[in-house]
């Protein structure tokens, strides 16, 4: 009831909410179409477009000029021969060669270069570059671009703001050490490209990366600070407001129009407009109006993390804070800061989990220490710029203040990094959890006048708990797409998590960019065991990254399981795994035939290698595990082939002879049911050995295993020709349904031990 009354008092706010909901529905009903650029090739192409943005980025220790082009089909102001040969699109990022001349912002240019296409995520949790750039309308990038022609006409205002930004950036570089300068360039000028990657990751892990984004805090400090200064100088309210608005719009233009900056400047302009109109400024109405204006400009910002975080924080302070503090007298700046931080945490908690799958537990306390110093830090930054321009000799004292505050920020974050329980890894919540959370928040705000304080906080706590619930779904078996490599994830009904292999020869830093994000997405903070089938890099280089980064990323490994082979057969990579595990205080255990891992209904039984196995190469001693969960069975074969596969097949035939496919097995097994067979040995899932090599998974092996589904893990267009044609023919003859990770993305089997559901990530 009180919500309805509140909406009546804010008719514009209600209208903005309605428009936002309509845009949300439209975007979901008719999503932007996917364009597959892989068919266009990577040969040199030419494109023509208008430069709407420029920036300098660091590549291979050199500064590279980056142009953002809005593509044009043709233009009279530029003389060209022949049509453009580049793929169709809306906008393109162009990385110019070092010796190229610099076109002005707003000029029309014709460029040649080699196209590169943004990759879609093929695993849960993986960064989706295609979707990220689609939000900004950017279709692809052009590398080693060469300027063929350009117009003399350009946008003088936009070019001037770019040059001013570069000049101020140089001033910071000349007066501050490199690391501190990169932080202040990001914080004051929006230049994120030069930011120290380790420092950026440190801030993100601890929940203070928002200080780097030009947002409400920055605009409030600068804009309101300027307005108050002008008023103290005796300038009228209207003129002070007009000057402040103009300079903040100029500032937003210079720093690149990020969603958070645009939101903050729009709200600031509405606040200044209320002075002109002599009306009361309402933060929630201004927030709604800013949201609608941005979404009408670009509806896909509904998917942008910066947009959602920016609006979420303000919504928490403007809507949730009054609900949780109504009827309570909060005295003192510290108490108000704590209340505001808690309200912001309640509203941003689901946003953290949706985009980052973790919540930095100490971020509330850390922000109470960080934010009060921001006004001093930004003031020192502005004074460094001013003194660097006017009195270079006087910039040192302000630079010292900046170094001290940033050192405090870094030290506080590193302290939190070493505290127990610093990260709550809950994974991405389901849509039903988000809906329940929103309903709880609506109830809280709608009936805030009728609820006592304890009940209100209880509802807020309940809403948070909903998001971290992880109801068991039986067994989850996922074959990740790691390119030319292997990585298998297993989770049972009790929440026990296991990883079998993790490496790639085609994807750089596969552990950092695919495996760890997937584990976070699943809400994994502890792996019961990581099994490495053999020591080839395409099976273990990601595991090495996981061992190195796991503690920092909030993922603990209890056991590292390696094949129990002869000491003489342990190569450098095998011994490196042992040493890294010992340094990380991970217990190393060894597995050979007959040994098993048991966790509730889940069992892994080792079939290969025999104890102390001596083989010619790593593939032959590869661990082979038979996994069972009720009637669901899977065989995980690593890269076993050659003599290793022959030895394994002989053992299996000796143990359980006479297991042949019955004539009654249908050619197409439904995806919602598991056929287990009456005879022993029939597999639900077989992981084809060695990425689908023609020399593995032979006929006699398939005669024994008779899998319903066979999964092949390999990279797209790999140089080895995997999966080989002869293997696919053999699998077809054995009537097994083949799933290939480079085509399907991550393949997930979910089962209760009787029925199975299969999902292919790229089909979702």
Image: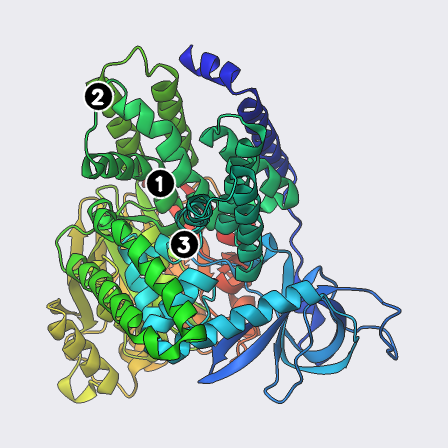
Task: Report if the CB atoms under discs 1 and 2 are less than 8 Å apart.
Answer: no
Q: For mark 2, what is the residue?
A: 328
Element type at marker 2?
Answer: loop
Q: Position of residue 194 (x, y in %)?
A: 43, 73
Mark in the foreground, 2 or 3: 2
| Residue 554 placement: quadrant | bottom left
For marks 1 and 3, the one nearer the N-term is 3
| Residue 75 placement: quadrant | bottom right
Image quadrant for the N terminus? top left
Mark in the foreground, 1 or 2: 2
Element type at marker 1?
Answer: helix
Q: What separation in Å lies between label 2 and label 3 (alpha carbons)?
A: 41 Å
Element type at marker 3?
Answer: loop
Furthest residue toward front: 234
Q: Judge by depth and name the residue closer to the eye, 422 or 748.
A: 422
Q: Judge by depth and name the residue closer to the eye, 521 or 632.
A: 521
Q: Position of residue 315 (x, y in %)?
A: 41, 34
As displayed, is residue 601 above or below residue 637? above
For marks 2 and 3, the one nearer the N-term is 3
Callout 2: few (<14), some (14-19), or many (20+) C-alpha neighbours within 10 Å? Answer: few
Callout 1: few (<14), some (14-19), or many (20+) C-alpha neighbours within 10 Å? Answer: many
What's the residue at 17%, 49% (across, down)? 599
As displayed, is residue 113 above or below residue 338? below
Q: Judge by depth and name the residue closer to the eye, 729 or 288.
A: 288
Q: Position of residue 121 (x, y in %)?
A: 50, 58
As displayed, is residue 108 above or below residue 273? below
Q: For mark 3, what is the residue?
A: 125
């Amino acid at each position: 009831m009180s919500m309805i009354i509140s909406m009546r008092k804010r008719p514009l706010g209600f209208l903005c909410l309605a428009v936002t909901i309509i845009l949300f529905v439209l975007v979901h009903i008719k999503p932007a179409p996917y364009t597959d650029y892989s068919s266009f090739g990577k040969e040199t192409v030419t494109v023509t477009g208008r430069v709407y943005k420029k920036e300098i980025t660091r590549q291979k220790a050199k500064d590279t000029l980056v142009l953002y082009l809005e593509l044009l089909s043709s233009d009279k102001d530029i003389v060209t021969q022949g049509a453009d040969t580049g793929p169709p699109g809306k906008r393109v990022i162009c990385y110019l060669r070092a010796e190229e001349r610099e076109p002005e912002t707003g000029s029309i240019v014709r460029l040649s270069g080699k196209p590169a296409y943004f990759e879609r995520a093929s695993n849960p949790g993986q960064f989706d570059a295609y979707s990220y750039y689609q939000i900004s309308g950017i279709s692809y990038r052009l590398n080693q671009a060469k300027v063929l022609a350009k117009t003399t006409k350009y946008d003088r205002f936009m070019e001037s703001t770019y040059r001013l930004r570069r000049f101020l950036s140089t001033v910071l570089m000349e007066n501050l050490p490199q690391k501190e300068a990169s932080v202040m360039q990001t914080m004051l000028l929006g230049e994120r490209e030069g930011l120290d990657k380790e420092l950026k990751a440190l801030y993100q892990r601890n929940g203070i990366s928002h200080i780097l984004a030009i947002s409400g805090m920055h605009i409030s400090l600068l804009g309101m600070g300027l307005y108050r200064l002008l008023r103290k100088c005796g300038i009228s309210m209207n003129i002070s407001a007009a000057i402040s608005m103009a300079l903040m719009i100029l500032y937003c233009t210079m720093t690149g129009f990020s969603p958070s900056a645009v939101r903050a400047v729009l709200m600031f302009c509405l606040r200044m407009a209320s002075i002109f109109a002599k009306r009361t400024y309402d933060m929630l109405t201004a927030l709604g109006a800013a949201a609608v204006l941005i979404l009408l400009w670009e509806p896909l910002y509904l998917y942008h993390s910066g947009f959602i975080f920016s609006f979420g924080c303000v919504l928490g302070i403007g809507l949730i804070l009054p609900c949780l503090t109504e009827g309570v007298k909060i005295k003192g700046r510290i108490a108000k800061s704590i209340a505001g931080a808690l309200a912001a945490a309640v509203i941003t908690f689901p946003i953290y989990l949706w985009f980052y799958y973790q919540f930095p537990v100490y971020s509330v306390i850390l922000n109470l220490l960080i934010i009060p110093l921001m006004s001093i830090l930004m003031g020192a930054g502005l004074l460094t710029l001013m003194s660097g321009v006017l009195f270079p000799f006087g910039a040192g004292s302000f630079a010292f203040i900046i170094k001290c505050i940033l050192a405090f920020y870094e030290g506080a974050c590193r302290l939190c990094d070493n505290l127990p329980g610093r990260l709550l890894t809950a994974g991405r919540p389901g849509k039903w959890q988000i809906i329940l959370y929103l309903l709880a928040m609506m109830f809280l705000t709608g009936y805030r006048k009728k609820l006592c304080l304890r009940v209100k906080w209880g509802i807020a706590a309940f809403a948070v708990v909903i998001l971290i619930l992880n109801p068991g779904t039986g067994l989850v078996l996922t074959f990740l797409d790691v390119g030319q490599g292997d990585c298998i994830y297993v989770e049972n009904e009790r929440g026990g998590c296991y990883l079998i292999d993790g490496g790639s020869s085609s994807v750089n830093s596969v552990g950092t960019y695919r495996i760890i994000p997937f584990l976070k997405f699943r809400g994994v903070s502890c792996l019961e065991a990581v099994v490495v089938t053999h020591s080839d890099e395409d099976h273990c280089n990601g595991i090495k990254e996981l061992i190195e980064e796991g503690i920092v990323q909030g993922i603990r490994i209890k056991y590292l399981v390696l094949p129990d082979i002869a000491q003489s057969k342990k190569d450098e990579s095998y011994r490196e795994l042992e040493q890294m595990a010992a340094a990380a205080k991970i217990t190393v255990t060894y597995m050979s035939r007959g040994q098993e891992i048991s966790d509730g209904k889940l069992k892994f039984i080792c079939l290969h290698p025999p104890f102390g196995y001596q083989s010619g190469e790593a593939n032959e001693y590869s661990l082979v595990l038979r996994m069972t969960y009720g009637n669901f069975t899977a065989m995980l074969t690593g890269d076993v082939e050659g003599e290793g596969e022959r030895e394994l097949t002989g053992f299996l035939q000796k143990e359980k002879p006479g297991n042949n496919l019955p004539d009654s097995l249908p050619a197409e097994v439904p995806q919602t049911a598991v056929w287990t067979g009456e005879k022993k040995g029939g597999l639900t899932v077989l992981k084809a050995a060695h990425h689908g090599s023609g020399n593995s998974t032979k006929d006699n092996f398939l005669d024994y295993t008779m899998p319903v589904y066979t999964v092949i893990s390999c990279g797209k267009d790999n140089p080895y020709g995997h999966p080989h044609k002869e293997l696919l023919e053999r699998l077809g003859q054995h009537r097994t349904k083949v799933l290939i990770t480079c085509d399907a993305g991550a393949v997930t089997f979910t089962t209760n031990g009787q029925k199975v559901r299969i999902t292919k990530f790229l089909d979702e």
